[in-house]
Image (cartoon, grey):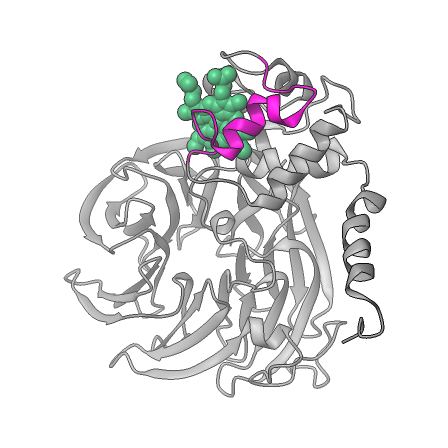
Amino acid sequence: MRFLGMSLATVAMIALAAPAAHAQTVSFSKEIVPIFREHCSQCHNSRQATGGFSVSTFAGIDKGGKGGKVLAPKPEDSRLVKLLEGTAQPKMPPAGPLKKELIAKIRTWITQGGKSDVDANAVVVPESSVPSIKVPVIKVRVPSLPEATALAWSKDNKFLAIGGYKVVTIVDPTSGKVIGELKGHSDKIHDLHFSPDGKWLAAAGGPPAQQGEVKLWDTATWKEGRTLVGHSDYIYSCSFSPDGKQMATASYDKTVKLWDLTTGAESKTLKDHADAVYAVAYSPDGKLLATGSADRSVKVWDVGSGKRIYTLAGHTDMVFDLSWNQKGNQLTSVGADKTVRTYNVNAQAGNQARVSNHDRTVNAVAYSPDGNMMATVSDDKSCKIWNTANGSATQTLKDLGDGLISVEFSPDSKMVAVGGFDGTVRIFNTADGKIVSTVIDLPKAAAPVAAPVAPVKPAPAKPTAAPKK
Ligand code: HEC
């Protein structure tokens, strides 16, 4: 309608002239590297240069692979472009072509000379930022639709904390009302826990490939307290020691760290995992620490000495989460091999007691506070509730959105909250599997046009009615 007064020819001329007039220099470091980092680096990095090709430096890209150079003065002569467009073999990436805009960007960069705007030998994709192929948080990367990545339910039943992208939403689990939003997180929240005394909420995450962060929020005022900063990549999981004096963190950087919460200082680094560590949990007596990793193992450590005591094998793919039972004599881990594995454990050794399944990757596991149940959630869109006495599934809650990533029992064990990739958190009765409520829908809560369950308070994260302790 706006062009009504112009001739069609004028419109066409503007349209044709526009791209040329606005052709801007494509920055290698800012625009090209992110494409390689996200879509190529897991197979073409400094550690594993498949086909002799590595994208970790410009020099590596310029050198090409075992078949020779991949860049050329003209895009149509470039083997890189041919592999991306599928006009030469092997088509890259193997899982399917890149979006047209990304290929167009690479073409433009090559037309403009295919040069680097940083030192040719500067490491542009460090090993620590190489994405793992099956990381659930990367494969469903839709920034406009926040995922309910983590859940924590306070022992006094006042708060349900929901982790999303850069923000933690605090909800009243009974009414579903949003109490506040905790902002200032640098990226996705990967884990949430209330301290044993309920005074703090820990939110773990950090900017990927840079550092790990755990922010501690005062639950009386919802003011930000201390931030623990360390690790060379984001923190996937954190755990308060039962006495509340220590915290353990597990990171994508393959290490586990112990922190002194009275000073905020790092006290130990545990280094035995060969790949990203996705889960960490103190045993109920605080003497042991269990960790689960992409290296397919679960390890049990002595907290006092920081030494690994034993490794629980069995998983045939990455381990994404684990949980101790209340007595501390059983440990259950879940992961990409679709299994739920329960081990009998003590301070000397452990052995597998039971294996159950989901149809797809199992992302999270939690024991109920009363110790009678266990809940697991999966990419197969279901949440299963298990009887811990005999290992049978007592409830299977099916078809819950796009798949589930977080699960948490209510303090009285009567309800279970499950969070999904679609940003929805639902609460179910554990006895009959009936839905109690949908407490929040993060995508809708984030979009002002769609009416959220309850009005979301703007930042700063300060509830108007400060919760009384
Ligand atoms: C899932 C793993 C994987 C991903 C992701 C991947 N590649 Fe490859 N790439 C391979 C394999 C396998 C080969 C073949 C190696 C061989 O021939 O031995 C290959 C070969 C290549 C080669 C040819 C090397 C040579 O000289 O023969 C280039 C260039 C290449 N890939 C570029 C890319 C680019 C660019 C991306 C991202 C857009 C990408 N690849 C993503 C696995 C991958």
Instruction: Residue 284: give x, y in percent of width and height.
Output: 40, 55
The answer to whether any part of residue 254 appears in the image is no
Above or below, 159 relative to 392:
below
The residue at 63%/73% (across/down) is 446
Q: Is residue 87 magenta?
A: yes
- Give the residue drawn at x 48%, y 29%: 87
> Any magenta on residue 268?
no
| Residue 161 can be seen, yes or no | yes
* Majority secondary structure of magenta residues: loop
Residue located 70% across and 80% down the image: 457
* Residue 40 image position (x, y, % from top left): 53, 32
**Image location of residue 25, percent across then percent down:** 81, 36
- Rendered view: 219 above or below 58: below
Question: Which residues make up the magenta segment?
Answer: 69-94
Which residue reaches farthest bottom?
A: 175
Front residue (pair 87, 402):
87
Left or right side of 289 for 371:
left
Q: Position of residue 290 (x, y in %)?
A: 40, 44
Along the viewing direction, whichever of 427 and 369 lies nearer the viewer: 427
